[in-house]
Amino acid sequence: MSVGARGPGPNARALAARERRVLALVAAFDEAGRIGPCVSALRRLADEVVVVDDGSGDRTASEARSAGATVLRTPRRRGKGGALEGALRRLGPADVWLLADGDLGATASNLAPLLEAVTSGEADLAIAILPPARAGGFGLVKRVAAHLIRGQTGFRACEPLSGQRALTPQAMEAVRPFAGGFGVETAMTIDAVRAGLRVVEIPIDGLEHRPTYRTPRGFLHRGWQGWDIAKAVLPRMLR
């Protein structure tokens, strides 16, 4: 299901957002050069930005800290889902959670419609539909993830792998503990729909990821992504 933000007008939504503590959580690995602008953009949307540096070997942590983020570091790579779950165990409560990928750079400022959908009461979990990628693979992993979500819940996901998500505290509780690695988003959608939560997908213009290409490294990344999704969905199929 793909919907645009509805409900109260812009002024009412802005007021509702100000009355809630928004915490932005970013898992990042080797995102130097992009994480700083990403944090700066998110600080305009959230009361606090927390970056989980998942064992980066570059300046990700220092750039995030300089941009104003609280930085939590893992001594070794735990994968996206593990890094986020570990951070959540250390953080206090929030009224609205905003998850974002560190490679969005300054385009993370465009995530406001996700917060509006949650703060207006339209959704418990709002997921960004990204513009068509400038580069990438053949879409196989994305189609498989969407097929798995539909098979387990009946929900037709347009963007099953999108890491750009806003959640209510109730939704966050329902989808934890997070699945490991790159299976976190697919598992989150399945868990949220099964819990009877309102899940919406919202097209958002202007979002831009660091591109991946049809190279050995790119295909290896997608292979790991598919493997993580399989590991996340299998136990949910057996429940």
Image (cartoon, grey):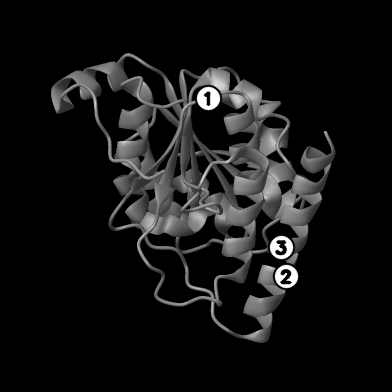
State the residue position of label 1: 197
Disc 2 versus disc 1: distance between alpha carbons? Answer: 30 Å
* Nearest to the observer: residue 196 or residue 107: 196
State the residue position of label 3: 226
Residue 60 drawn at (x, y percent): 56, 56
Residue 171 drawn at (x, y percent): 56, 24
Residue 141 drawn at (x, y percent): 63, 65
- Mark in front: 3 vs 1: 1
Q: Quadrant of residue 87?
A: top right
Do tag 3 and tag 2 residues touch (Cβ < 8 Å)?
yes
- Label 2 element class: helix
From this viewpoint, is residue 30 visible? no
* Nearest to the observer: residue 69 or residue 179: 179
The N terminus: image quadrant: top left
Residue neighbourhood size for the residue with mark 3, other residues' Cα within 10 Å, grouped as few (<14), some (14–19), many (≥20): some
Which amino acid type corresponds to the residue marked 2 in the rendered image?
Answer: Gly
Disc 3 versus disc 1: distance between alpha carbons? Answer: 26 Å
The disc at residue 223 is: 2
Which amino acid type corresponds to the residue marked 3 in the rendered image?
Answer: Gly
Taking the spot 58% from the left edge, 54% from the top edge, the residue there is 146
